[in-house]
Amino acid sequence: MKRGVLVTGGAGYIGSHTAVELTEAGYEVIIVDNFSNSDRNSLEGIRKITGVEPKFVEADCCDKEAMRRVFEEYEFDSAIHFAAYKAVGESVAKPAKYYRNNLLSFINLLELMLEYGRKNILFSSSATVYGDAEVLPVTELTPRKPATSPYGNTKQMAEDILRDMVAANTGKLCGIALRYFNPIGAHPSALIGELPRGVPNNLVPYITQTAAGIRECLSIFGDDYNTPDGSCLRDYIDVVDLARAHVVAIGRLIEERNKQNYEVFNIGTGRPVSVFELVHGFESANNLKLNYNVAPRRAGDVTAVWADTTLANEELGWRAERELIDTLRSAWEWECNVRKQ
């Protein structure tokens, strides 16, 4: 019998790719999403890629009774929580919106997991918890810095909530927090990918929309950082590699191979890439020229952050495999496919 996995926010960017990888690994996926930052077409994309119609419930994870009905109707012993708002700028302007959604949705899920005896929870965290780290690359033991935005603070707070809930319910709840670095790219089929609503929050959608002529010019915020080419350094990970990390991590919990009831792993490539390097890599991968300019530094941007992935490589047996050039090609193929629809 297939093991059921609940995926909240499963119609979103990372959630949809994870749903594909879980399905292809033999799990039965139950998706919950309210389409606040996702698109129904992703469900069709999942079906076309996997040949399996995903089980789907349209619901808001902040609505506990709606979530209770999911627990009543479907069999699963594990959940992956993606459902959260993620725009840093909006979180600064509307902090209450972020605290209410990102924390209440997670607390509801955890309480229902305990109530219905569902043991394994995987949390979608972020490298933003490290802030402007003094020593690079960051390891899982790198001290967390005070968050620079309400969004980042919700990730830190949710990690703490998961840690405390697991500690208070030994034997009843086990959790893993995956700290992502910078997910980019799309599925090689170009059937699912990143589809931001309104102004993108991430660099690669800005790049692809500029290449498509949707945006006139790409702004690179700062060329005077203390880095080899003056632009910020980040750890860009292919979204399919990231999705596969979730399959490995949920398997670790299900098979009880975890060494502690609460664990944390960095999910990145371990390789710093500059903004200029990413832009020029996209141009080279797709034989395009981008219109870009250098703008003043943006408040809140750290100079550099990238992962030490040793723990994930050795403990999870996972590592990033896709080449950056292939990832950047997939991002452009996805953008072109979206424009055809």
Image (cartoon, rainbow, N blue to C red):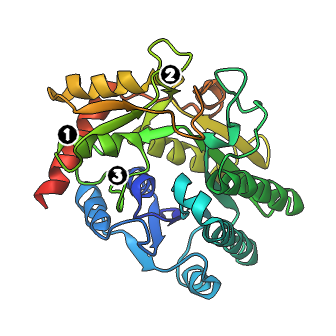
Type of amino acid under label 3: Glu
Sequence-earlier tag: 1 or 2: 1
Which residue does the image show at 75% across and 78% down from the upper left? 115
Q: At x 54% / y 23%, what residue is drawn?
A: 270
101 w.r.t. 252: above or below = below
With 127 as the anchor, is 24 left or right in this view?
left
Across and down, in percent, residue 125 comes to: 62, 49
Query: Mark 2 = which residue?
Result: 272
Is 90 or 13 nearer to us in this picture? 90
Check disc 3 and report the residue beneath it: 194
Q: Position of residue 46 (x, y in %)?
A: 31, 60
For residue 324, side relative to residue 81 (left or right): left
Crowding around mark 3 (Cα neighbors within 10 Å: few <14, some 14 to 19, many 20+) is: many
Q: Position of residue 302 (x, y in %)?
A: 60, 32
Residue assigned mark 1: 211
Give percent across and percent down for residue 304.
Answer: 58, 25
- Residue 188 seen: no
